[in-house]
Amino acid sequence: MSNHAIPAAHVSELIQLLGDPVLLLNWPLGTKGAKQKWKHLKAEVAMKDATYLRELEKGNIGVALGDKSGALISIDWDEDEILEEFLRINPTINQTLVSKGKRGGNVWYRMIGEYPTRTVKLGRNSLPVGEWRSSGGQTIIHGRHPDGHQYKLVQKLPAKLISFDQIVWPSGVASPVSIGESRLLEVNHSNDAESEKTNDHPHTAFSNPLSSSVILCPPLSSSVKSVEDCIRLSIPNEPHQNNSALFKFARYIKTLEAFEMRNFEMGEHVTAFDRWHCEAKRRSVLRVEQSRDQYLMEYLEGYRKVKHLVLEAKLLKDAWDMAIDPRAYQPDFSSYFTSPIMHRMISWCYYIQHLADKNGVIWFLSCRDAGRYLGVSHTEANQMINTLIRLKILFEVEKSSQSKARRLKWTACNHHPTSQGVS
């Protein structure tokens, strides 16, 4: 961040605790939001704008959740008792940022892997007890509560990087993704302000499991078992992403073919593409000057160029689980690096290569995926990868492109810098 865009101390503290990327929102003091648009904002632009940062100093500060802030979420508990219960039964993930308004509090996490990307109500015995807050929503973290209380940080720790399956839910509270077994209420995002529960607006209907909009977001498992999966994993969220999105769609279709052990007929390709195109059109992300047939030709050309299946997402997650195991073998590069995050990065890459060799596949790693797992910005992750390449711990087999991440290979199998210099 340039010198002329240095944020105030409390804003800087929030950025540090919440991690990068994060999009902070400016609201009038004493409110939980207003009818002003913010979903067009992007963290990488707004949070480097000196004028935008100065506006944050004036009132309440909200945090845009989910995809706006790199898979940052908050779990809002209504009462102190259930907040304390949640932290008590989650000893492995309770060392994280916790904020508080009037009562209860928000527990903050940055997610890796699959997680619910819509805000849903959490209930116990048919009574609302909290919310899972994600994409499309926001949470106030600084300023003055409407009743006069000051928002405060009751546990000043960085938002912890976790996977969704690490969360243990209090007794009687169903997981947000267990829609068929729980009675969860979907928040209706009718405006851009934060949706809140109040006694003045009691909830009277529960969401239908068949019509729920609770969905999962990247980075996702490579388990592609239907055309719906292919569409869900590749559909763009905003305009000017269709070239790379169509190539991803083609890769997922080819992965699905491998899963079903057959090749699609041309009619199946066209039908699958039309479903993708219909969803992209519904989201208003298609170019008005580009016809359906042009998009179809682009998809078919992308399919022809696909060389590798979508296997690396699961590979990255499995390797990460192995690397964070305290019993795991840790490659010794202590004479190069002293920071735990670099040691974790090296161990992760070691296990990615181990699993890739075991399964007979190649692997790719984008700086955004690396940043999400390691809890750093994608630019810092890119610098870390480049450093490992320069030290010949990794070898760049294939450079990144618009449609795919760079292909890497671990080359330090017998190279330990504690006993050797850089070759």
Image (cartoon, grey):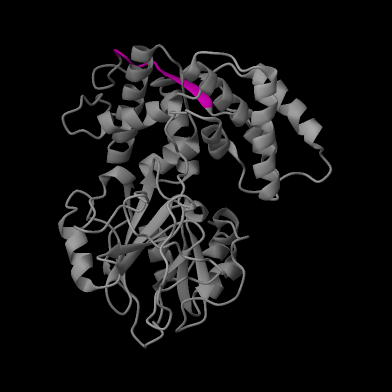
Nearer to me, 265 or 305: 265
What is the x, y in percent for residue 288? 81, 46
Residue 266 shown left or right of residue 89 in the figure = right
Tell me what residue is drawn at x 38 percent, y 21 percent: 393
Does any portion of residue 239 appear in the rendered image?
A: no
Does any portion of residue 230 appear in the rendered image?
A: yes
Which residue extends farthest bottom? 148
Nearer to me, 415 or 247: 247
Indicate whether 250 appears above or below 86.
above
Determine which quarter of the picture holds residue 139.
bottom left
Residue 196 shown left or right of residue 307 in the figure = left
Quarter of the image where the C terminus is located: top left
Give the residues drawn in magenta, as a range.
406-414
Determine which quarter of the picture holds residue 228.
top right
Determine which quarter of the picture holds residue 9.
bottom left
Tell me what residue is drawn at x 49 percent, y 67 percent: 7
Nearer to me, 202 or 82: 202
Which residue extends farthest right? 289
What is the x, y in percent for residue 13? 38, 65
Tell me what residue is drawn at x 22 percent, y 55 percent: 94
Q: Assess whether residue 296 is covered by the magenta stretch.
A: no
Indicate whether 307 appears above or below 324.
above
